[in-house]
Image: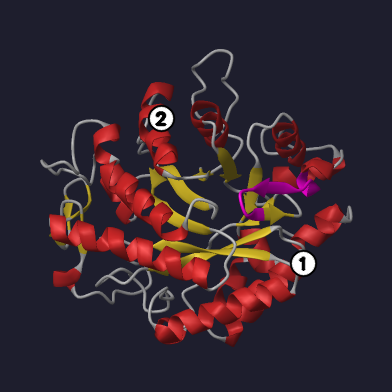
Amino acid sequence: MSTQILFQPFSLKSLSLKNRIVMAPMTRAMAKDGIPGAAQAEYYRRRAAGGVGLILTEGTVIDRPASRNDPGIPFFHGEAALAGWDAVAKSVHAAGGKIGPQIWHTGSTRSSRSQTQQEDLVESPSGLVGPDDPRGKAMTEEDIADTVAAFASAAADARRLGFDIVELHGAHGYLIDQFFWEGSNKRKDAYGGATIAERSRFAAEAVRAVRAAVGADFPLSLRVSQWKQQDYAARNASTPDEMTAWLLPLVEAGVDILHCSQRRFWTPEFPEIDGDAGLNFAGWAKKLTGAATISVGSVGLSSDFFGAFGGQGSESASFDNLIERMERQEFDLIAVGRPLISDAEWTAKVSSGKLEELGGFNAADLAVLA
């Protein structure tokens, strides 16, 4: 087995990466008063020094009331927060890495750790967290316009600060995804509707505004998912035609990269379809839209995955399976999540063939930013 495909360069517009490994955005919620500091700068610098091709930061919130559901989630607005992110970007660049902020609004979702929002400020498409689960208020058209403008302002600041890419979080049941999902979007105006194409209007407007704010040559990624934290079995698109109706207009609006989150990267998206039965979510998104894609989902977390280094383990979850998919260009980049929390040198170990030193993820490491 050769891991060479993981270490081929990748370029798109102004972005040039030394390899295909992406550090997935992972909420750490350790930014005191919403301001990233020296601890965050060192945390990301270590992963860049460890060889990660592209770092996508944890979700950072736009300038809207109740845009975050945990007090430790960092802002991406305001002089102090932006100065902190400027230091983070400079630290990563000094270590030879590339980095982009993930721009976020948590919508009406609840946090399992704390509850900090004022309930009367919590906003979502229809005042719902999910089906029959009310919380907060339904957004007015003025709220929607202001939120779109806040996404654009944050993206413009990302480019101004020297980041290499920006990503919008449109997955996992947060605000943008709450517009996508029929379980949380019951609107009767132009931002709702019976079809995924109709419910994608808010996202398309946000994408167009961000594209106008950052210019034509700056890469824009959009993270999307079928599953929600509210319902792991939820689906925005049950067929390839529905997926095209969902994602292609967003690519046409200005998305360069679709960051396709599924719980396990080796799971076929439409297993019932002959011929393309093996393609995962990122594979189908690339096939249907022509956009570059990032795949993500439990890379490095399965015991079978690591057993495969010695020629053992499940074929579906093996490292060989990942390599084979990348070699046939099913998707362009692979995002690694929790293993990079536990081991900043994960990428370097894979690059140098020290696969026996990979240790997966230790949940105790979530308590520290190291």
Q: Is residue 11 magenta?
A: yes
- Badge 1 amino acid: Gly
Q: Is residue 304 left or right of residue 256?
A: right
> Which of the marked residues, 1 or 2, is nearer the chain's N terminus?
1
Q: Is residue 316 above or below residue 86?
A: above
Is residue 314 in view from this perspective?
A: yes
Which numbered circle lies on residue 210?
Answer: none
Q: Is residue 45 above or below residue 285?
A: below
| Residue at x 27%, y 70% (from the top left corner) | 64
Image quarter of residue 239: top left
- Badge 2 amino acid: Met
Image quarter of residue 192: top left
Mark 1 nearby-residue class (10 Å; few <14, some 14–19, many ≥20): many
- Image quadrant where one finds the C terminus: bottom right
Element type where label 2 sits in the image:
helix
Q: Position of residue 8 (x, y in %)?
A: 79, 46
Q: Position of residue 5 (x, y in %)?
A: 79, 41
Question: In the rendered image, which residue does mark 2 sit on?
Answer: 243
| Residue at x 59%, y 66% (from the top left corner) | 363
Q: Position of residue 243 (x, y in %)?
A: 41, 30
Element type where label 1 sits in the image:
loop
Q: Is residue 128 above or below residue 244?
A: below
In this picture the colour scheme is secondary structure
| Residue at x 71%, y 66% (from the top left corner) | 97
Q: Position of residue 106 (x, y in %)?
A: 33, 62
Q: Which span of residues is magenta-colored?
A: 6-15
Q: Is residue 141 left or right of residue 94?
A: left
Image quarter of residue 100: bottom right
Question: In the rendered image, which residue does mark 1 sit on?
Answer: 50
Q: How many marks?
A: 2
Asked whether 310 or 237 is in front, the reply is 237
Q: Is residue 218 magenta?
A: no
